Image: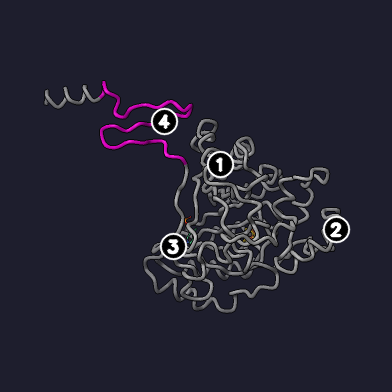
Amino acid sequence: MRKPQLANVEDLIAAGLVPEAQREAIGKVAERYAIGLSGTLAALIDRDDPDDPIARQFIPDPGELVVRPEDMADPIGDAAMSPVDGIVHRYPDRVLLKLIHTCPVYCRFCFRRETVGPGSPTHLDALDAAFAYIAAHQAIFEVILTGGDPLVLSLRRLADIMARLGAIEHVGIIRVHTRVPVANPALVTNALAEILRNTGKTVYVALHANHPRELTGDARAACARLVDAGIPMLGQSVLLRRVNDNVETLEQLMRAFVRARVKPYYLHHPDLARGTAHFRVSIAEGRALVGALRGRLSGLCQPVYVLDIPGGFGKVPIGEGFVTGEEGAYRARDFQGESHLYPPRHDAVALDEIAREA
Ligand SMILES: *Cc1c(COP(=O)(O)O)cnc(C)c1O
Ligand code: SF4
């Protein structure tokens, strides 16, 4: 298993990413939450920019120790929906399979921040029960590998897991959620792509990235190795204050995904994870941003803006309503904000005439 290159306060100070004066404050954060940053992402940080969007995602902030009343240890209710170790089964047709709690980077806003980290127990030695659970539930069409990040596993381990999932007949799709192509693009080798492709199942890879700068030439080449091997890719992002909460950055991010042949899938409203209030935007702000994207990006570039309902009730789209009213009198708002009746009156008359002639 590969560990992040910068993994503690000392590393961050040595790299000039945390000032010496913050040693104590950041040390307190480190006692509570894992730290991890790859050399690839560290190299993207502009050390002269106090508000650098890459630094904000990965460099610990004293604000993480501020706990607000609405904060939750398990914001999306994973624990309540876990029938056996490693499995989260919320929707009948799909499960999460959490293999490990290790990541190539530790995102400061992570919704699983209470469970991920280098010292966390893995599920690797207790996977028999998870595979048995999937095999026993015919309704499971899709298995979503998450964690942690499944692509930090050794190729041998990954090949074994893919083969075991491949042997379960009713599983149709294996989806892998990862940050590796941006955090550590060199790990995405042709050998890895081959393992993902050779399962006998349809495999999708969902890439987590939040700022267009993450999609470097190396990251795009890593995506190309997967896509060229026949693996379709999806993009998922979290809407984060002072990282990507403006329409220009979101526009560039979605275009960067699509250019890399990664179809934007979800834009997540930030979860109520503990100590992450400084990353939150309001739903009203999020809706206004997503509404503005409608006018600026093609359908290919549009993600679905979703909220994971706290407590384990699943995801729900929360973008602006573009249609209001009721049967016979809908109003549809166009991308420039103009409102139009549906059906338009003259169409209604024409339909009446057709009905009369028939
Ligand atoms: C997000 C999530 C899924 C996947 O949901 P999709 O909408 O299919 O992407 C599945 N199970 C759980 C528990 C989830 O949190
Ligand atoms: S890579 Fe994913 S699981 Fe790991 S810290 Fe980041 S958001 Fe959390």
- Callout 3 touching callout 1 (CB < 8 Å): no
Could you tell me how far apart the alpha carbons at marks 4 and 2 are, in whole angstroms?
Answer: 51 Å
SS category of the residue bearing label 2: helix
For discs 4 and 3, the disc positioned in front in the rendered view: 4
Residue displayed at 61% across by 60% down:
68
Residue 228 shows in this picture: no
Between discs 4 and 3, the one toward the N terminus:
3
Marking on residue 13? 2
Q: Amino acid at mark 1?
A: Glu
Asked if the residue at label 3 sits under 8 Å from ligand 1, the reply is yes
What residue does disc 1 label?
285
Q: Which residue is mark 4?
A: 333
Q: CA distance from mark 1 to mark 4?
A: 19 Å
Task: Establish whether ligand 2 lies closer than 8 Å to the Cβ of label 2.
Answer: no
- Residue that label 3 marks: 94
157 up-or-down from 332: above or below: below
Q: Residue furthest front?
A: 69
Disc 1 within 8 angstroms of ligand 2 (CB): no
Report the span colored magenta.
320-347
Label 1: how many Cα within 10 Å (few below 14, some 14–19, many 20+): few
Return the x and y of residue 338 as percentages of the image width and height: 43, 25
Mark 3 or 1, which is nearer the eye?
Answer: 1
